Each structure stands twice: as C-alpha cells, then as structure tokens.
Image (tube, rainbow, N blue to C red):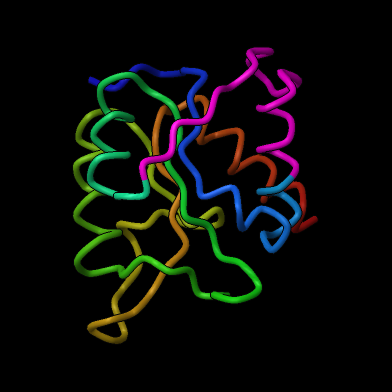
Amino acid sequence: KIPEESSIISFNEANLENWDEPMKETLKKWREGTGKSGKKFSSRYIGSMVGDVHRTLLYGGVFGYPADTKNPSGKLRLLYEGAPMSFIMEQAGGIATTGTQRVMEIAPEAVHQRVPIVMGSKNDVEEVLEAYADWKK
C-alpha cells in the first residue's frame, strides 16, 4: 500500500514554465514547504515512468507528466502508459488523474492517445485536484 502522503515529487521540472497555473503553483508550494502538508518536498526524477512510479509506490509522493504548451494533450499514452500505471496506483491506494479527471475513466479515442498524468499518494494528489478545481471557478 502506498503511503497516503510523502514529500517526494517526480516531475520533469525543466518544463515547469510551460505547465498550467494550478500545476505550477502546487509544485512551487511543495518545493517551498507551503503546501497543505507543510512539508518541503524533494525532487527525485529518473526520467523513466516505470522506475519513477515504482519508487512512488514504495515511498509515496507524486509522479507527474502534466500537459504543457508544447504537448497540450500530455505526453504519455493512455492505453499503454497512463491507464496501466493508473490501475496499479489505484490498486495500491493512490490516485491517478489528469488534473481534472480520473485517468481510469477516460474512454480511449485513438490507440496512441496522449493524456496528462499526475499520480501518487492520496493526500498529495488531492492537493493537485483542489488546485485545478479552484482554477476552473
């Protein structure tokens, strides 16, 4: 079972300036220690989804490859990256989302369809969901 919260983030932060505001703000708060948990998060990014998600499952935290201005639909493929890892994450007690919807509820429209992904510890990913919900208001 994945820990409900942690202080590890796993994102390609080189793309940070191209992300949506809710994702940028949440990551900034985590790095500064001003997020909901009050913990200062550390960054651990391997660059391999399987490796990063495996570590996230073991120690908690958040793995993400959000949409950006270059890849507005995200970069990871729904059918053979997003959905399988989301299934595993949810079975372990975590959450997997695009920021606005549950990955496992997306009906595929194309074999190579891409989606933004944020998955990991329940409490940490809920903070991302809240940021997106507030942004839409």
Is 66 covered by the magenta stretch? no
Q: Nearer the viewer, residue 7 or 101?
A: 7
Say which residue appears at 53% left-offset and 57% top-offset. 66
Q: Quadrant of residue 38?
A: top right
Above or below 3: residue 113: below
Q: Quadrant of the N terminus?
A: top left
Q: Nearer the viewer, residue 38 or 94?
A: 38
Q: Nearer the viewer, residue 58 or 137?
A: 58
Q: Which residues are magenta?
A: 25-46
Q: Is residue 98 left or right of residue 3?
A: right
Q: Position of residue 97 (x, y in %)?
A: 44, 51
Say which residue appears at 44% left-offset and 27% top-offset. 61
Q: Position of residue 84 (x, y in %)?
A: 19, 55
Residue furthest to the right in view is 137
Q: Quadrant of residue 54?
A: top left
Is 31 covered by the magenta stretch? yes
Say which residue appears at 30% left-offset and 68% top-offset. 78
Q: How many marks?
A: 0
Above or below 33: residue 26: below
Q: Position of residue 51 (x, y in %)?
A: 25, 40
